[in-house]
Amino acid sequence: MVDRGASALSLPDDWPAHPDPILALNRMGTFDWDLDNGVFHMDAQAHEVFDLRPDEYDGNPATLAVRVPPPEGYRLDGLVSQAMKDGSENYGTYFRIRCRDGTMRWTHTQGYIRRDETGRPRRIVGIVRVATEELAELEQRHQQAADDEARRQQTSVVQLTTAALAHARTIQDVIDVLKDTHGLTHLGATSLVMGLVEAGRIRLVAEGPSGSFVPGTLITRIDEQYPMSEVVRTLSPRFIESPEEFADSYPILWPHITDLHITSAAYMPLIAQARPIGAIGLLYNDRRGFTSDERNVLVALGSSIAQSLQRAMFYEQEKDLASGLQQAMLPRTIPSVPGADVAVRYRSASLGRDIGGDWYDLIPLPGGRVGAVIGDVQGHDTHAAAVMGQLRIVLRAYAAEGHTPATVMARASVFLHELDTDRFATCLYAEADLSTGVVQVVRAGHIDPLVREPGGACRRVSVEGGLPLGLSAEFGQLEYPVGTIELDSDHTLLLCTDGLVEQPGTDLDDGMQTLTALIATGPKDVRDLADRLIDVAEERGGDDDVALLLLRRRVLDAPQPGGRLQQHVAPGDPEALTAARHMIRAAVRAWGAADRADEIELVADELITNALMHTEGSAVVTLRVLAGSERRLRVEVEDSSSALPRRREAGESGVSGRGLLLVDLLTDVWGVEARGGGKAVWCEFVVPERP
């Protein structure tokens, strides 16, 4: 049409090449282009479209260059040439012309290519028309579409941010969501600042870009001249649309942030339940001003942030309250135990106020013994913590009364069953004699203990167990088997709850193997080992609490006055009775009482036999050396019967009734003590000091 090359003028992809008839205007002319002769004929209306008088146009297409700017001409010629080359029947496009007064006018042309029988283009006929108003309307449509898209994007950001905030539990979670790439940065904000209202002041919790902290703004008064203080006072948002406005409005703050190149900012109060709980500011360095839609979006987003922030504050308060309640139920301090190094640890699951009922305890007992307890009440709530506290107290009380480990566990089960609760509890109670290393273990549905040797080797100790506390009383199965562990010097006993063992996707045995391997490679010191185990539990996370108790037996630096040995003898177990006799004989000789060995062995055998015959239960034989004004050897035989022994005359031909007479004749002193649900018959022999 105009004899120039192609143009780089571009239009939106969806602008039509063919005009909408509804939008067509009256100013439209026709043309007839004879390609063989190069003559471009136009009618009078076409002259008006190009703003040419008839005498200003000679039929040569090149003459139109006076109205068609070079870039437009290049593009038109390229378009027509391509249409003729690729066999098209027509073409159409928008282009601009420069009118007589210098203004630019949008124009549309559409041509139809006539070819001969060989396909060669011979003629083009078509129309030209004024399209300024049409394109203005199209441009308005595109601007509206762009505005709608921007609005959709802003709404999408609000929805995404609100959805992410729904999962925020803590204040830091809220801050992390807002700083995330799916947060406020999608709205074009360079960074954000946020403060919380506390006791009439604003405490800064998010300071904006790294290194941008302004001295003196960590804690500010609400009446100070800062933007966050202003929006908290007025409960209204503040939109700052230029650096000049920022500098004029906040002369105290502006000099400290000029290096951030802030061009505008938006500050919103965070209001929850009709009161301000904080304020947030969005800082921009690439824009000035805010449209009404943008302001509405930011205000709506501020409301969503405030609700999420309030939930986070309630969550942290409830978590602190629950954690305080739980800690109050646990021992405040762990007593120092001669002959042992002890470490305890506790990790609370991240469940807000839903706390668990895990607990540990260490109970000093007479005779150099110590009771170690680990347990877990069913459930994760304050009720579980309350039940845990009561169980811990009664277990400690029963152990301190002198009951055997099995009796302690049975009585605790009855207590829980009679308590006004539907909860049960797993528990493991270990009573250790640190002078001999003998540990009696009773297990009520709890996981087995572990023992680590000085070289690091760790093993799981299988202990026959009974039903969990509460359930054993409900089903009438209160007989708890007692297992025995020999804890040598520098051996460590480890008790824990299942939160340290159980992992998603693995069974209990696999978890115990993993824990065993971790302990084997851990530090030797029990405190360092406990720290490592609890750190692993923290890294792994999980929805269960973890309680942990480690007890390492060590050799005392100084010799202790006397010793202590203990042996269980079950009815109908001749091997246990023989072992008890051997223990007595060896202890008497080792403690320098060989002169009275026959007397001691005879009396001990008599007491054991009486316990087995008259109580239909097991007997616990304890030997110890007592130091004082004179050295004495004490023998105790404990059984589960509360009936007291009594002396009676055997008669001339009687074969029974002589036992207590024999005890009375051979011992220096003897007696009977009540032991909870049973009794202990004891006697003492004065023995010379060891050389």
Image: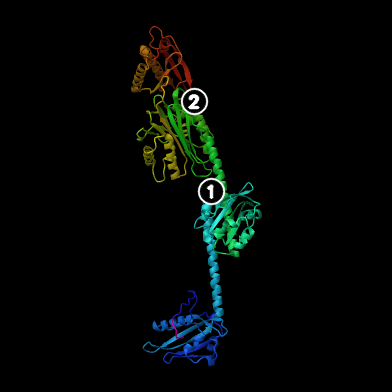
Q: How far across and down, in percent of the image, does residue 545 sit?
A: 47, 40
Q: Amino acid at mark 1?
A: Thr
Element at badge 2? helix
Q: Residue furthest top?
A: 652
**Image quarter of residue 140:** bottom right
Residue with the mark numbered 2: 400
Residue at x 41% of width, y 44% of height: 503
Residue with the mark numbered 1: 170
Q: Amino acid at mark 2?
A: Ala
Camera-side residue: 215 or 70?
Answer: 215
**Is residue 58 rendered to the left or right of residue 240?**
left
Element at badge 1? loop
Residue 290, disc: none
Q: How far across and down, in percent of the image, does residue 587 sit?
A: 36, 18
Location of the C terminus by quadrant is top left
What color scheme is it? rainbow
Q: Which residues are magenta?
A: 1-5
Closer to viewer: mark 2 or mark 1: 1
Mark 2 packing: few (<14 Cα in 10 Å), some, or many (20+)?
some
